[in-house]
Image (tube, grey):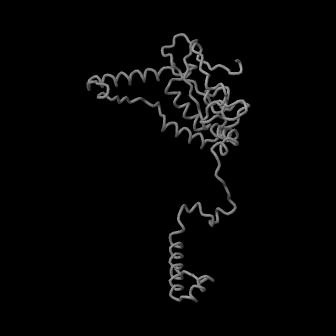
């Protein structure tokens, strides 16, 4: 492999004053050129701008919200359409759900008997009891707030919804209008399409109506030191002992 290194103006100037220094400088440049041609300049090859495939391609780093939120509705709709009508997409989703969830994720209890002061026999008994109770709960429809699916079925629904729509929220609820329920705790799944900010709250902003008191903003829109209230009367505010709510200083 031929390495073509020609002296530039600075090389010729150095060689005019000191031929030895000029020769060493030229030899060093040749060594660097040979190393670069053999091993590259370092870093990922895909990130180097001299590649033919990257010409005309430009991207800049932004926040996660800036990258995902503007096109999330369209992407979610296209993903769901593909999950319904594209056989390859359906097969890919089914494969992921089958190999990740299968017939359901089981609990394998492993309690620390030494820390709890239990004998090996008591540890085995507790672990068997936990496994049996977990399976009884997950095999029932009490896990679903709407009592339409078992707990193991909800695992598959939650995972499929996450990989299809990009998000899924699980809310723990305790329905009181379902007679015959054995387990009080149930779970309600919220699809990604139903997740959004209130109309008056921008992405990444704090909702003053639901934020904790130490994260609420001042009336003039500024935040106090370390995120705390900057109202003059903030130091004297305390939650009501009976209701636990914070009093509105404007009501005084």
Q: Is residue 35 above or below residue 202?
A: below
Q: Is residue 6 left or right of residue 109?
A: right
Q: Nearer the viewer, residue 125 or 81?
A: 125
In the picture as drawn, the residue positioned furthest to the top comes out as 179
Q: How many marks?
A: 0
Residue located 57% across and 25% down the image: 171
Q: Nearer the viewer, residue 128 or 111?
A: 111
Q: Position of residue 163 (x, y in %)?
A: 58, 38
Residue located 62% across and 22% down the image: 237
Residue located 54% across and 85% down the image: 22
Quadrant, the C terminus:
top right
Q: Is residue 231 left or right of residue 27?
A: right
Q: Position of residue 53 (x, y in %)?
A: 64, 63
Q: Position of residue 8 (x, y in %)?
A: 61, 82
Q: Position of residue 239 (x, y in %)?
A: 59, 19
Q: Is residue 247 above or below residue 53?
A: above
Q: Is residue 129 left or right of residue 172?
A: left
Q: Is residue 12 above or below residue 85?
A: below
Residue 128 image-quadrant placement = top left
Q: Nearer the viewer, residue 207 or 56?
A: 207
Q: Is residue 216 above or below residue 4?
A: above
């Amino acid at each position: 492999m031929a390495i073509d290194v020609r002296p530039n103006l600075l090389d010729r100037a150095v060689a005019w004053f000191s031929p030895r220094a000029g020769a060493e400088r030229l030899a060093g440049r040749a060594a660097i050129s040979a190393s670069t041609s053999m091993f590259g300049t370092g870093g990922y090859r895909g990130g180097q701008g001299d590649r033919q495939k990257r010409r005309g391609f430009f991207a800049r780093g932004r926040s996660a919200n800036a990258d995902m939120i503007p096109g999330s509705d369209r992407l979610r709709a296209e993903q769901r359409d593909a999950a319904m009508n594209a056989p390859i997409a359906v097969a890919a989703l089914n494969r992921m759900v089958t190999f990740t969830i299968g017939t359901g994720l089981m609990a394998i209890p492993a309690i620390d008997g030494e820390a709890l002061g239990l004998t090996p026999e008591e540890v085995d008994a507790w672990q068997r009891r936990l496994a049996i109770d977990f399976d009884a709960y997950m095999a029932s429809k009490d896990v679903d707030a709407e009592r339409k699916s078992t707990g193991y079925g909800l695992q598959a629904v939650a995972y499929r919804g996450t990989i299809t729509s990009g998000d899924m929220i699980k809310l723990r609820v305790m329905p009181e209008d379902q007679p015959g329920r054995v387990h009080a705790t149930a779970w309600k799944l919220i699809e990604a399409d139903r997740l959004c900010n209130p109309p008056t709250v921008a992405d990444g902003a704090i909702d003053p109506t639901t934020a904790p008191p130490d994260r609420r903003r001042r009336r003039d829109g500024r935040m106090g030191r370390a995120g705390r209230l900057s109202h003059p009367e903030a130091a004297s505010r305390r939650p009501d002992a009976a209701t636990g709510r914070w009093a509105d200083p404007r009501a005084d």
